[in-house]
Image (spheres, rainbow, N blue to C red):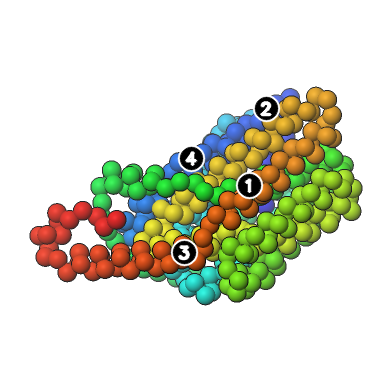
């Protein structure tokens, strides 16, 4: 909700007038900067959190950072575009970073038999909460608050900050840190944080971020109509995530992802080839039903394959791959628009949207190389080895432990 409303407010008002186009460019750069910062930071900080046993501390710290700087955005006035962009970058880094540690707790609150449904329930509640927050925000804009000084729009930032804080309190006070605190040198943290490789990327980020622009350019759908469709799509995504959570637990994360990616590929083809409102609604319905389960199953499968002592580090890399996709997808989309747009705008958007299908195809191809059962066995083996090594270390005399190198 805040990105959908505040991005437009930023471009048209805070950096408005003749600077509207530059304001839009500045906003996209702020989004990209925050994505790069999260991608760089999270593998390292995830490893630090694992070895220090302080995932919850990182989660709370980044969440409070996001809440504070979202609150401060309320006070930014017209013409203060750079200040608003800087505050947004800090707030967004906090939000995305807190999600890394939030996701890293999934394996601690669910076992391998319930991972899918718990992940799906989390996405379902997230979608429902987002829709409720959006409904209240729209009421503030159109019904309840005065428009002088854009108070009605600016106040949605206070709503988001308060919403985030209130619904984070149960987590702040109720979530227990189970990992044992360990110590290691900064050099060890760095070598651990950057050891792994990014293996998964998809086009969902591009699809979500470019859908409004695509429908306006190709289908001439108004913003109000698109908002209604987006609300229905998000509700379908939440229901799909919840329902497919049980399927995930039944048939496994890999098969669930195959189903959702095939659905997204089909929806993409329909949306590109069938350039009418009917075709878009059919494609949007399929996307809605597949989008939530895809995100949920990706998280649950990843959580099952991650050793217990590497939750923070690996979900940091999970975030890294997500942030890279948020750069590569829009970059590809924009490149196609730049090459073809001077000749035919409609064709350019259709070809650009078609590139998203390629991301799904590549993701599906990579997915077939994942040996899920072998990965699950390997994770169990690593957990057993780590528990044994940790037990041996704890039994050693105190003088010996001082000189011992960190386990793994």
Compare residues 303 and 146 and report the one nearer the observer. 303
Q: Which residue is mark 2?
A: 22
Determine whether, in the image, residue 271 is placed left or right of residue 75: right
Q: CA distance from mark 4 to mark 2?
A: 22 Å
The answer to whether residue 249 is left or right of residue 193 is right
In the rendered structure, which disc, 3 or 1, sits on the residue that comes first in sequence?
A: 1
Crowd class of label 3 (few under 14; some 14 to 19; many from 20; radius 10 Å)? few
Q: Quadrant of residue 213?
A: top right
Q: Tell whether 36 sits left or right of 12.
A: left
Q: Which residue is mark 3?
A: 374
Residue 220 x/y as whole percent: 87, 42
> Nearer the observer, disc 3 or disc 1?
3
- CA gap between label 3 and label 4 equals 33 Å
In terms of sequence position, does the residue under pointer 4 or pointer 2 come before the other? 2
Q: Is residue 4 visible?
A: no
Mark 3 vs mark 4: give the one in front: 3
Q: CA distance from mark 3 to mark 1?
A: 22 Å
| Above or below 228: residue 341 | above
The nearer-to-camera label among 3 and 2 is 3
Where the C terminus falls, by quadrant?
bottom left
- Residue 367 in which image quadrant: bottom right
- The disc, 2 or 1, on the residue closer to the chain's N-terminal end is 2
Q: Of label 3 and label 2, which has the lower sequence position?
A: 2
Q: Position of residue 289 (x, y in %)?
A: 73, 62
Quarter where residue 57 is shown: bottom left
Percent across and percent down for residue 224 are 83, 49
Circle 4 residue: 37
Disc 1: which residue: 362
Circle 4 — which element? helix
């Amino acid at each position: 909700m805040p990105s959908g409303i505040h991005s437009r407010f930023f471009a048209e008002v805070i950096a408005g007038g003749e600077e509207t186009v530059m304001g839009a460019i500045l906003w996209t750069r702020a989004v990209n900067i925050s994505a790069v910062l999260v991608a760089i930071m999270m593998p390292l900080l995830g490893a630090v959190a694992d070895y220090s046993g302080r995932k919850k501390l990182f989660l709370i710290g980044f969440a409070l950072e996001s809440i504070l700087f979202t609150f401060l955005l309320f006070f930014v006035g017209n013409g203060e575009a750079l200040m608003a962009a800087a505050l947004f970058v800090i707030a967004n880094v906090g939000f995305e970073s807190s999600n890394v540690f939030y996701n890293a707790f999934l394996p601690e609150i669910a076992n391998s038999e319930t991972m899918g449904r718990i992940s799906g329930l989390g996405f379902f509640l997230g979608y429902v909460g987002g829709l409720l927050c959006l409904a209240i925000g729209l009421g503030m804009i159109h019904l309840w608050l005065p428009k002088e000084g854009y108070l009605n729009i600016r106040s949605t930032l206070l709503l988001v900050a308060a919403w985030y804080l209130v619904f984070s309190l149960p987590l702040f006070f109720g979530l227990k840190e189970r990992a044992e605190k360990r110590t290691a040198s900064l050099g060890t943290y760095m070598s651990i944080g950057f050891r792994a490789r990014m293996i998964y990327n998809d086009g969902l980020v591009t699809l979500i971020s470019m859908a409004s622009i695509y429908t306006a350019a190709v289908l001439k759908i108004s913003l109000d109509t698109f908002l209604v469709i987006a609300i229905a799509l998000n509700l379908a995504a939440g229901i799909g995530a919840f329902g497919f959570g049980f399927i995930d637990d039944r048939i496994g994360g890999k098969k669930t992802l195959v189903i959702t990616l095939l659905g997204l590929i089909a929806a993409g083809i329909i949306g590109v080839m069938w350039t009418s409102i009917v075709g878009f609604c059919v494609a949007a319905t399929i996307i809605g039903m597949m989008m939530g389960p895809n995100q949920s199953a990706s998280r649950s499968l990843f959580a099952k394959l991650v050793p217990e002592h590497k939750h923070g580090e690996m979900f940091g890399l999970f975030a890294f791959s997500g942030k890279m996709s948020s750069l590569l997808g829009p970059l590809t989309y924009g490149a196609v628009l730049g090459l073809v747009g001077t000749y035919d705008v409609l064709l350019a958007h259709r070809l650009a949207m078609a590139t998203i299908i390629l991301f799904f195809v590549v993701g599906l191809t990579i997915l077939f190389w994942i040996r899920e059962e072998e990965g699950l066995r390997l994770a169990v083996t690593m957990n057993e080895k780590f528990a044994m090594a940790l037990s041996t270390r704890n039994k050693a005399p105190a003088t010996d432990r001082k000189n011992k190198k960190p386990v793994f």
